[in-house]
Image: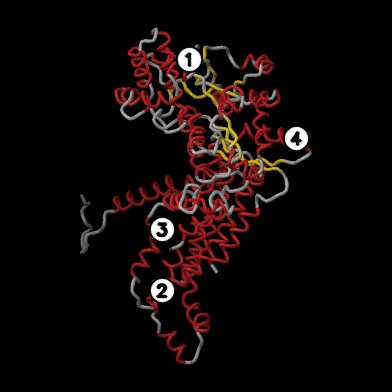
Amino acid sequence: MKTRLLAAALTLGLAAPASAQDAILNVSYDIARELFAAINPVFAEKWKAETGRDVSIDQSHGGSSRQARAILEGLPADVVTFNQTTDIQVLADAGLVDENWREAFPNDASPYYSLPSFLVREGNPKGIEDWDDLVAEDVQVIFPNPKTSGNARYTYLAAYAYALEVNDGDHEAAQDFVGRLFANVPVFDTGGRAATATFAERNLGDVLITFEAETAQIARQYADQGFEQVTPSLSLLAEFPVAVVSENAARNGSEEVSKAYLDFLYSPEGQRLLAENDYRVHDETVKAEFADRFPELKLVTAEDVFGGWEQIGEEHLAEGAILDRLFVNQ
Amino acid sequence: MRPAAAPGALAPRPDQRVAKALIAAAVLLTIAVLVVPLAYIFHRAFAQGFQVFAANILEPNTLHAIALTALVALLTVPVNIAFGIAAAWAIARFRFRGRKALLTLIEIPFSISPIIAGICYLLLYGRQGLLGSWLLAHDIQILFALPGIVMVTMFVTSPFVLREVLPLMQAQGSEQEQAAVTLGASGWQVFRRVTLPNIRWALLYGAVLCTARAVGEFGGVSVVSGSIRGQTNTLPLQIELLFNDLNIAGAFAAASTLTVIALVVMVLKTAMEARR
């Protein structure tokens, strides 16, 4: 009885993907659902017009490291759209993604980007305009724990980069600055969503730091509270890299549609959809259209300031490294 | 400190104030921990009116999650009933080497966290796992598809029926069955006419508990599901995703559905307890 049911379950499980049309699975980070819910139907229409074939696009969302892990264990992703380059690199190291994936698409395979930015309470009562306003004594800052949250890691590095910039590259001064910033954080939640809840539902803190795309969405979600977005003078480029999972795509026969799907993100149409969802894009026309929603600022990269993610891992994030020391001392 | 006993009272009377304070504390705790959160789920689910609630439930991905969860329970519970009866029968009626070990083995899922079950399956059936390359070569998808979800749910719920049926079988002993055999009943007749009627309430009770657990399982399934929306998202996973998407009304609507299932199950359980 057990084996027969198991066999039935197996057939049911196998029957699903065996339809005649094109099908791809996009495995993505956890807050991108609305984004791809907006993009997928537009792409499907375009694909139909170009090739005459239907395409169904399935979505899986989760923490991107966890998603990478699932793909390593066999989650049949055709494309990945992540928020950490390191998580695609893991797949490339395992041979699932082409070694030179960063050259496979323009802009280092990152069709859109964002940056750590601020969300303040209605009327900005504490007058917060830039990073140095955050270390004032009466200001409470909310962002998640940089030990557990990738989002907060960007915040940490952006604050560090800002302090390096204003202190002419003096690391000691920069670390002192970040230490004072940590001291102004009343609670370190484990993830971005929890920090949002702390700020918006528990009413704790004067400013929430998270990706710009998030601050815009939170401001809309809690429209009745009148939160205001504030863009600092300098921040850290947060890339959102994409790749075709070539091993899976080859097995599923979906290479062509997978590539077309990611190419679409770079098309003016795709870039407009991305900008509408509060992500910054590279297309000049779209940039001009949305200029008022994305204030100019100085953007630095992890490569330029910190020598790349590998070095950040060793010097800042490893156990007992700079982040640990600042985190404990606050 | 007790107030002076009434004249003539022989036994020390319990202090009314302490009793009342304890009862009040218990009631308050129950309200704060249980009643209010449960009521709040429904309040939030219907906060924007019934139409919004219905739209949230009928959203294709949520609807699919409900159907998938039901399917998983339908596949899991019968297997566990058959397995539970067989195992209880073997352990209650026969003496054999390794009987205690078998009992312990079956009860393991009670004591270990479901996420460990999920990870074990990942390490065994995953692409990098022990059987991974063989499965890949034969194009058999177990993880991140229905088979994996069903298997993990079976793992987690496997002790429920056994745990309810076994004590009853042991307490009843085998006299009636032996009598049936001496009267010439076949094995199947003994089971149908004697064993099954004797254990039916315990069996149903176990099945109900098993269903509740199968429907609500989160941790183990979340490891092997892959969270593909509209494909491998069970209801508990869908609730978490809706919540993470800041779709609070949708999350509460889905949560209220799961809560209704749980409440129905609990009512059935209470009714059955009365029959036992």
Name the chain under label 4: A
Q: In the figure, is residue A166 to the left or right of B75?
A: left
Which label was assigned to residue A298?
none
Q: Are marks 4 and 3 on the same chain?
A: no
Identify the mark at residue B168; answer none if there is no mark.
Answer: 2
Estimate the x, y position of residue B17 in percent, counting from the top left.
Answer: 30, 50
Viewer-nearest of discs 3 and 2: 3
| Tag shown at residue A45 | 4
C-alpha separation, residue under disc 1 versus residue under disc 4: 47 Å
Q: Badges 3 and 2: C-beta atoms under 8 Å apart?
A: no
Question: Does residue A249 sit above or below A6 in this rendering?
Answer: above
Mark 3 vs mark 1: in front: 3
Q: Between tags 1 and 4, which lies in front?
A: 4
Residue A223 in view of the camera: no
Nearer to us of marks 4 and 2 is: 4
Q: Are marks 1 and 4 in contact (CB under 8 Å)?
A: no
Find disc 3 in the rendering and name its residue.
Answer: B109
Mark 1 sits on what residue?
A: A125
